[in-house]
Image (spheres, grey):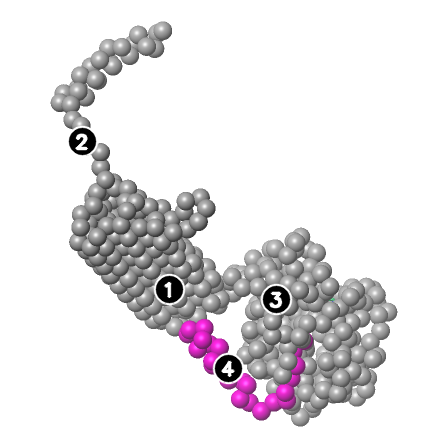
Amino acid sequence: MSEAAERGRKYDGSRMSRTPFQALVLAAGKGTRMRSGLPKVLHRLAGRPMLQHVLTAVERLLPLRTVLVAAPDNRLALAQTAPESTVVVQDPPLGTGHAVMCARPLLEHFQGDVLVLYGDTPLIRPETLNAMLARRREGDDPAVVVLGFRPADAAEYGRLLTDGAGMLERIVEFREAASSELAVGLCNSGVMAIDGAVLPALLDRLRNDNAKGEYYLTNIVAIARAIGRAAAVVEGEADEVLGVNSRSELAAAEAVIQQRLRRMHMDNGVTLIDPASTWFCADTRLAQDVVVGPSVVFGPGVEVGEGVEILPFSHLEGCRVAAGARIGPFARLRPGAQLGEGVHVGNFVELKNAKVENGAKINHLSYVGDARVGAKANVGAGTITCNYDGFGKAHTEIGAGAFIGSNTALVAPVKVGDGAIVGAGSVIAEDVPADALAMTRGPLTQKEGYAAEYRRRRSKSKVTAIKS
Ligand code: UD1
Ligand code: CA
């Protein structure tokens, strides 16, 4: 599905009757284990900052408002990435409960639900968030609905302690858990749907008398129970609540997201010959019957039309390819490459900011940048557009039906007219009129028998040369 269509098709759940909600995305943590100058939630997955994945999932459910809890030092970068969110600053970070307290002015007198998410849990799906909001509305009116999961290794996650009926009683943090509690396999993902009408009262009762001296948001569950409200668990897949704290976890999350994207494209009618070696960006758009060979990489901003064949080891980024084109193997399409219908771009061809019109062919070993190649033109092997003079860029124009001989240098700005022929090995630094022949070649010199005589002479002197 195209990205526009994906956006247009708001998640079906939004049509279900449910309480309006605000989303609160926590992202003020230090992220020290990433060992990075970049804020953790801005590290990319499938070419897009982690944070944007969370926002995209939540925005499919049409929140009244999305609030981002940032730290003083990542506030600006986060606001830039999420221009539609309201940013509040938490300073200093005193825990997940404290992070929610920082957004309190925006939550006061709010009767809807509050959905709390983590900026470092980017794989969450809208379907799951919707299930949580739906659970919030059920007859027992739970004040808090927590997204639980059962990881293979519960490690340092908080544990969800339930009663005999499966209702949530409290959450115990890893550091505070007794060994019997650590044996519980049901873990806290951190994602919660909370009744906004009681949230301020729950926050009022949070204390920081615990192992880390922090205000744990997780404690609102026990507090809700203490004031006579229910709390519930919705279980999700371990994959989708994977939290990213380190580069290894970032790679693990990337693997999950690539897996999802591969399946999505195949479901949409794209053939991936070797899915495991095909790398996508979240915004890659491929039409039906596109065939993608092994080890093809899609960078951001690629749109490919019907029936296009992309042969192995090609790299595409910021480009549009019309129906029926054939690309690669080993082709590189850089930003601004626009290929018309039926265009062929072959091995070791690099295109940048170049419009290649219908049926044109650039089949071998070329660089075409800042250029237009007219319909059905043929650009021979080793043709280079010399678009850069060390200071600025200039444009090359190749007319429709023109034929550029192999190993031609086109020194931009330059124009080759429609139907013109350029002889192989030329350096073209002046415009060529339509239908003309242009070539720049030194005269051919031939000396008959010279090569044989030369070999004879050299082979005699060889022994002496080495001895001396
Ligand atoms: C938290 C949960 C734990 C759960 C785990 C799931 C609490 C007390 N514990 O632990 O039960 O199993 O997540 O991954 O909630 N953040 C702030 N401000 C803060 C602290 C954190 O904005 O003062 C943000 C972080 O940026 C991050 C999220 O909250 O996005 C979680 O914080 P983190 O410190 O990673 O919590 P955990 O110790 O993993
Ligand atoms: Ca964490």
The label shown at residue 10 is 4
Within the image, what quadrant is residue 221 found in? bottom right
Name which residue type carries label 4: Lys
Q: What is the secondary structure assignment of the residue under circle 2?
A: loop
Residues shaded magenta? 1-24
Left or right, 372 with reference to 196 = left
At 22% from the left and 34% from the top, the residue drawn is 442
Q: Residue tagged by mark 1?
A: 320
Q: Earlier in the sequence, mark 2 or mark 3?
A: 3
Disc 4 crowd, CA 10 A, few/some/many (<14, 14-19, 20+): some
Quadrant including the N terminus: bottom left
Q: Separation of disc 2 and disc 3 at Cα? A: 62 Å
The disc placed on residue 80 is 3
Q: Are marks 2 and 3 in contact (CB under 8 Å)?
A: no
For the residues bearing labels 4 and 1, Cβ distance under 8 angstroms: no
Q: Which residue is mark 2?
A: 444
Residue 64 appears anywhere in the view: yes
Q: Nearer the viewer, mark 4 or mark 1?
A: 1
Q: Nearer the viewer, residue 200 or 271?
A: 200
